[in-house]
Image (cartoon, helix red, strand yellow):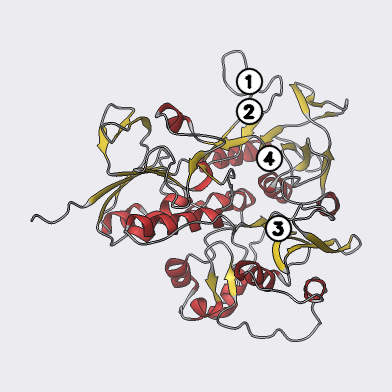
């Protein structure tokens, strides 16, 4: 008998989920092709706002270089766009007419921006108004950076600062607003919901975030929608007119599903998959990351996307594995703002599926909320005080049964004593699920990032990882 043919696995997308899958399949008996439509090597989108702020160089965001893929026999094709999926022939059709055959197809297409219904964003020739900047990609970041430099160099006096309005008060909107403010832009945030981070936190936490932003120099308008862009500024539906030099769009994204729809795959909000991340329509097609819908839920966070990639890699290798979709962890990466979200913390008190324990201190700018069901943490929101985030994340991930007093104790401030050394089993990187022991086994921050992927997600664990590997944090750059 002839040996079985090596599986041909084609991945559509070159984002963070696709790279994680490639890392997990490197060395496996597969012929792996990654089709990325951007010209850049795969990079960390979460830290784009850090590039805009100036705390990270663009090169520092690269997850894996083209040479890394080549050394492992992975065919990475940058600047390659897929036109169609031919499921009957098991081929993807590229825009130049080339066909790429597959035994398994993985859709890791991510999400795409959608324009909010604001009159004046698009000119008659179909192009965006020159003041308008979407913020989703490295090219978007570079265009916005060039616009900021142009405003600074246009001869304004030092006392006249350029103005920017960020449309969208979600995680990305707050990150961009902080970056613009750090670049000395007079920045305002417009959010249509009644509070910031409305998809993740309750009004009390949103109010504290708004107060923190105002303290840091950013005005906030909630419960208001932008309706028209004119030469005079951005008009809101409450009658306010915000003069502005730039409008940055961070609201309005949706899973990229056009390819899947045209191929006849079942699509809800995302590509509908089962516990093995396999399309419910075609067992040779899979989806991971932002474009995947599992149990009627899509996620825009890196932690579940990486978990999906790891599960799918095991499935492709022929191992038993399944994704339950429970783990959802997100961190806000913005200077001066500390937010961590676990699961869905918006469960109101009194509902049968969860009990809420919360401590709020608007004066100190902190709000901590746990949702407990059956004695286990099923959701949490921590704003302004992340001193217990490692322990709470560990309890959440493990489904640890808590005593009746423990939820309240977890929300109390830590005593002002010397920090207790982290045990090896304590999780320090929520995005990649890396423990303190795994970090300690590395000799440098670079080795840790390469081996474990810690610090390459939201970046929130960087200080702890540096301490564990014995490296000092870099000195702040002089302005």
Residue 21's place in the image compared with 81, above or below, is: below
Task: Tell which residue pokes out farthest to the right in this image.
Answer: 363
Q: What is the C-alpha distance between the residues marked 1 and 4?
A: 25 Å
Please say whether residue 472 is visible from this viewpoint: no
Q: Quadrant of residue 150?
A: top right
Q: Nearer the viewer, mark 2 or mark 1?
A: 2
The answer to which of marks 1 and 3 sits earlier in the sequence is 1
| Residue matched to label 3 | 335
Q: Nearer the viewer, mark 4 or mark 2?
A: 2
Q: Position of residue 115 (x, y in %)?
A: 63, 28
Q: What is the C-alpha distance between the residues marked 1 and 3?
A: 32 Å
202 left or right of 250 in image: right
Task: Tell which residue pokes out farthest to the top in this image.
Answer: 124
The answer to which of marks 2 and 1 sits earlier in the sequence is 2
How crowded is the residue under tag 1: few (<14 C-alpha within 10 Å), some, or many (20+)? some
Task: Tell which residue pokes out farthest to the left in this image.
Answer: 1
| Residue matched to label 4 | 152
Question: 183 or 282, which is in the foreground?
Answer: 282
How crowded is the residue under tag 4: few (<14 C-alpha within 10 Å), some, or many (20+)? some
Q: Position of residue 160 (x, y in %)?
A: 80, 39
**Mark number for residue 115?**
2
The answer to which of marks 4 and 2 sits earlier in the sequence is 2
How crowded is the residue under tag 2: few (<14 C-alpha within 10 Å), some, or many (20+)? few
Q: What is the C-alpha distance between the residues marked 3 and 4?
A: 22 Å
Check whether the beta carbons of the residues at disc 3 and disc 4 lie within 8 A of each other. no
Q: Nearer the viewer, mark 1 or mark 4?
A: 1
Provide the secondary structure element on which disc 4 rests.
Answer: helix
| Residue matched to label 1 | 122
Check whether the beta carbons of the residues at disc 2 and disc 1 lie within 8 A of each other. yes
Provide the secondary structure element on which disc 1 rests.
Answer: loop
Q: Quadrant of the N terminus?
A: bottom left
């Amino acid at each position: 008998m002839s040996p079985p043919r090596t599986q041909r696995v084609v991945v559509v997308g070159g984002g963070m989920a696709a790279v994680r899958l490639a890392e997990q399949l490197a060395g496996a008996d597969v012929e792996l092709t990654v089709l990325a439509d951007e010209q850049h090597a795969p990079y960390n989108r979460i830290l784009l706002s850090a590039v805009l702020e100036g705390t990270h160089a663009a090169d520092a965001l690269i997850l894996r270089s083209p040479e890394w893929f080549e050394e492992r026999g992975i065919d990475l094709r940058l600047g390659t766009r897929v036109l169609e999926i031919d499921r009957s022939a098991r081929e993807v059709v590229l825009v130049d007419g080339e066909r790429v055959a597959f035994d398994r197809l993985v859709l890791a297409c991510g999400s795409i921006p959608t324009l909010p219904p604001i009159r004046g964003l698009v000119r008659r020739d179909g192009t965006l108004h020159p003041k308008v900047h979407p913020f989703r990609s490295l090219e978007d970041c570079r265009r916005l950076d060039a616009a900021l430099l142009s405003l600074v160099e246009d001869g304004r006096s030092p006392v006249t600062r350029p103005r920017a309005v960020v449309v969208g008060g979600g995680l990305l909107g707050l990150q961009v607003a902080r970056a613009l403010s750090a670049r000395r832009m007079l920045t305002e945030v417009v959010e249509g919901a009644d509070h910031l981070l409305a998809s993740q936190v309750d009004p009390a936490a949103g109010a504290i975030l708004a107060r923190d932003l105002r303290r840091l120099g950013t005005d906030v308008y909630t419960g208001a929608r932008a309706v028209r862009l004119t030469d005079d500024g951005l008009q809101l539906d409450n009658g306010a007119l915000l003069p502005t030099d730039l409008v940055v769009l961070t609201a309005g994204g949706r899973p990229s599903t056009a390819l899947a729809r045209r191929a006849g795959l079942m699509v809800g909000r995302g590509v509908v998959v089962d516990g093995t991340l396999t399309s419910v329509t075609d067992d040779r097609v899979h989806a991971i990351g932002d474009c995947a819908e599992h149990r009627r839920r899509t996620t825009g966070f890196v932690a579940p996307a990486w978990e999906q990639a790891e599960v799918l890699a095991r499935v492709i290798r022929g191992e038993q594995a399944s994704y339950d979709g429970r783990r959802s962890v997100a961190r806000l990466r913005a200077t001066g703002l500390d937010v961590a979200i676990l699961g869905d913390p918006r469960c109101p008190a009194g509902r049968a599926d969860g009990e809420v324990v919360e401590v709020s201190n608007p004066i100190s700018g902190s709000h901590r909320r746990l949702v407990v069901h059956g004695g286990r943490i099923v959701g949490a929101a921590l704003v302004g005080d992340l001193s217990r985030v490692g322990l709470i994340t560990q309890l959440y991930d493990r489904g640890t049964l808590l005593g009746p007093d423990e939820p309240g104790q977890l929300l109390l401030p830590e005593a002002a004593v010397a920090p207790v050394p982290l045990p090896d089993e304590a999780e320090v990187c929520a995005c990649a699920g890396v423990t303190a022991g795994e970090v300690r086994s590395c000799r440098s921050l670079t080795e840790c990032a390469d081996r474990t992927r810690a610090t390459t997600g939201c970046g929130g664990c960087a200080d702890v990882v540096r301490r564990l590997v014995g490296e000092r944090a870099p000195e702040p750059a002089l302005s």
